Amino acid sequence: MDSSSSPRFHEPAPPSRFVARIALLFSAPLFINGFALPFFPVWLASLSFDAAQISVILAVPMFVRVFSAPVAGIIADKLGERTRLLFWSAGLSLLTALGLFVSHAFWAVLAIYTLQGVVYSPYVPIVEAVALTGVRRWGFDYARMRLWGSIAFICATMIGGALISRFGAMMVLPAMTVGFVAMVAVTFLAPRVGAPRRPSTLTTLADPPPKALRAPDIQMLLMGVGLVNGSHGMLFAFSALYWRSIGFSGTEVGLLWSAGVAAEIAMFVAAKMILVRVSLWAMIFSGAGLAILRWLVFPLDLGFWGYFALQCSHAFTYAIMHTGLQTMLVRRVAERQETAAQGLYFFYTGIFTALCTFVSGIFYGWFGVHGFLSMAVAAFIGFALLIVAWTIQPQSSGSSGMSSEPS
């Protein structure tokens, strides 16, 4: 903890080594994601599933967890100590990972992976909630904690790429299982911070959004950004398969995925400087516009370094747009409605990512890499929704979105 952020006099002392413990809690699940996001589709393809089947297996858990996550949030908040749910989330996730070894029939894999999505989904949001409790109560630096999760993701993609080059798709399940074992282990290090003083982001999804969040421009803003985020669905589902099909090694695929995450980290680091120089709408529009361009260019024969540069555009197609949206919400939504706003953002991003992942299997099956053009269409629709949001925003918001906080 920085010397400038000593505990406030009315707060008890923070749990010992809070930052390091939260960093480990972030690192374990994102280490798993570093294997699963790029390479789980490769494992599915090794079972001779076609593109449509792969997209269904990937999309159904996304749909289900959008609706199951609020239930987990309610349970976590009612437990008083939310970290108690982490052990159950990690332990049940490990059991589902072991279950994937049992049967490789389509319906079995779909059922087990969907169940894994349900039990795994509350883990990171609970860690986020505990980390933000540390930020509010004791002034800890959120970025310093969350950064280690991104580093773990990059390490996993690099390790996974090397392993898949040597052992093929058979390495995916064992690697994910090791990650789940680590996730169970670190739950015993979770700091106890007591009962939440406000409902979690997931809990708020079970209630109607507050009046401020029902404003048409806020709804269009959240849907537009959610749809642009969702347009990454085909990248998550089929990029590794495509790059492997054109001769890239597992290590090269790992490098490409790492490039996107590293660019995202760099943008988040630079965000504070950008915010004082660029309007929020410019940040949001630049991310959405570059997402359209990204998916239009993806089908071209770019070679490794061309795709490396394209992956670095993730700094804009996600990070800068996400930063602009979050800052816009801070300026447009009262603090007491903060968690409801984040819950609604989670909902739209989850639904649109699931939809785009599902249709990506159809278009990739029909058109191969040219199916990425369908993601350009999704990003364009999101861009159009953002233009509508900008057009109908209250005059007091101004072109930069700098309105006073509602009462």
Image (cartoon, rainbow, N blue to C red):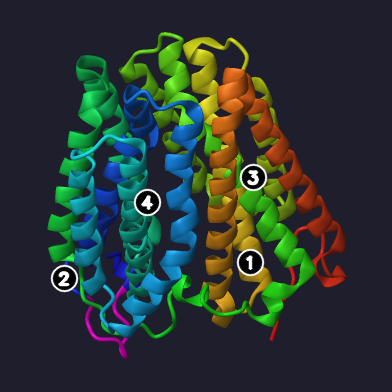
- Identify the disc placed on residue 80: none
Residue depth check, mark 2 versus mark 4: number of the one nearer the observer: 4
Measured in 3D between alpha carbons, the distance from the residue under mark 2 to the one under mark 4, in whole angstroms, is 36 Å
Q: Secondary structure at mark 4?
A: helix
- The residue closer to the viewer here, 124 or 105, is 105
Please name the residue that numbered disc 4 is placed on.
114
The N terminus: image quadrant? bottom left
- Of mark 2 and mark 3, the one earlier in the sequence is 2
Instruction: Look at discs 3 and 4 and give the one toward the viewer.
Output: 4
- Residue designated by label 1: 329
List the residue tagged with mark 3. 228
Predominant SS of the magenta segment: loop
The stretch in magenta equals 6-14
N-term mark: 2 or 1: 2
Place of residue 291 in the rendered image (x, y in percent of width and height, measured from the top left): 65, 35
x, y percentage for residue 205? 52, 72
Quarter of the rendering containing residue 170 = top left
Identify the mark nearer the N-term, 3 or 4: 4
Q: Residue at x 74, y 71 (%)?
A: 403
